[in-house]
Amino acid sequence: MIVRGKLLDGHGKLVGSGLRIEDGRVAEIFDVEPDVTGWITPGFIDIHCHGGGGSSFPDNPSPEGVGQAVDAHRALGTTALMASTVSLIDTLPSIEGLAQACEEGMLAGIHLEGPYISPHKAGAQNPVAIRHPDLDELREWLEAGKGWIKMMTIAPEVDNAIPAMKMLLDYGAVPSWGHTNADLEKTRTVVKATAEYAAEIGWTKPPQMATHLFNAMPPVGHRAPGPVRELVAAAKRGECTVELVADLVHVHPDLVHDVVEYVGASNPHGVVFVTDAMEGAGMADGQYVLGGQSVNIVEGTARLVRGGAIAGGTSRIAEQVQRTVRGGYLSMEDAVRCTVAAPAAAVGFDDSTPGVTLEWLVGAAPNVVVMNDDLDVERVIREGEILS
């Protein structure tokens, strides 16, 4: 099989004009040609996703439920997917089910979003489940996760935030600061403590993240910059990776451009696009569920029935690439870097991780997304197997 198009690696670098794939392996990488049309990118990576295709990871972590959601994202080229929970009274069953799905190769990891967050910035999280970190409980979850828990969203101002951060790093997971009402000073203290502890233990990846920057945190003010300013500054220094839900609903597209340009100038892998998708991703408008809470999707935007807060996203990664690039807000090269190399760097994925291709290598089983000039997805290949 031969696929032709401008061939980008996971860092968004133009490296060829197509691939020849034989027996599920890259047999040849064609040299760059000036007149080739369309695009070929590595499979996309989504490290913050609650579900899709009518199934929710925290609500139905069974093999059937997980598979249904994973298939909805793979259909548009997301070949490596982490499953996100939400704040739950009892998180353990979800962790156990999702860890099993990781062991079976359906998922690449787990993201715990809550319950150790601010009740003042709950967003679509269940306020009844929100609580301060319990280190015994956290250790039980990390043990049950069998190494598959790669990140956890915590508010920097909650009691025991720093001990919880240290425990996460000790278990190989990164803290992701979010769902927070913290001011700049509190955020700065926790960000600094995290960077220092990571250096102390010899941590080699970015030591912390920011969960869906701007959303579920105080806005930037000229006298009270809040957590956003400190998280962006840390990302520019290389001490943090910031998530953006780049669906043009959660964050204004001009602001997406500004953050990518500002952080990327010194830290190319400092910004990650995530879907924050719930079970309605890839589905029609209607009624859905997120963490046991009722959600309505109207004109593609999901909101809680109770209170009307945005309740996750409905896009898939390819759709974020399409919207940001078609709209002229980002180059294709920038969009691919934010959806392949950056998420891989944030959680420690490499070319040996199932579903991940960062560099095109002859002999490797590739993860491929083929798009036409209009960025419509025409073909998806995962680990050398044609999915669509």
Image: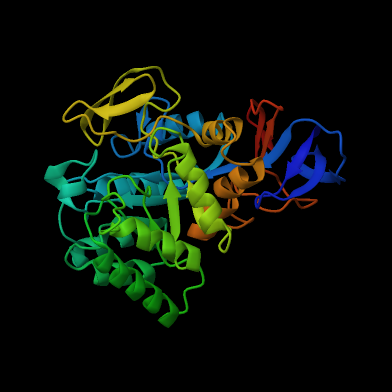
Give left or right: position of 35 versus 181. right
Image quarter of residue 245: top left
Q: Residue at x 47, y 74 (%)?
A: 203
On screen, residue 191 above or below 375: below
Q: Residue furthest bottom?
A: 200
Give left or right: position of 381 versus 148. right
Viewport quadrant of the C terminus: top right
Image location (x, y in percent) of residue 310: 29, 33
Image location (x, y in percent) of residue 162: 26, 71
Image location (x, y in percent) of residue 301: 35, 26
Q: Residue furthest front?
A: 222
- Please name whichever residue, 277 or 216, is drawn nearer the observer in this view of the structure: 216
- Please name whichever residue, 205 or 72, is drawn nearer the observer in this view of the structure: 205
Image quarter of residue 384: top right
On screen, residue 165 above or below 279: below
Mark yes or no: residue 81 visible: no
Give left or right: position of 234 versus 214. right
Q: Residue at x 27, y 50 (%)?
A: 217
Viewport quadrant of the N terminus: top right
Image quarter of residue 315: top left
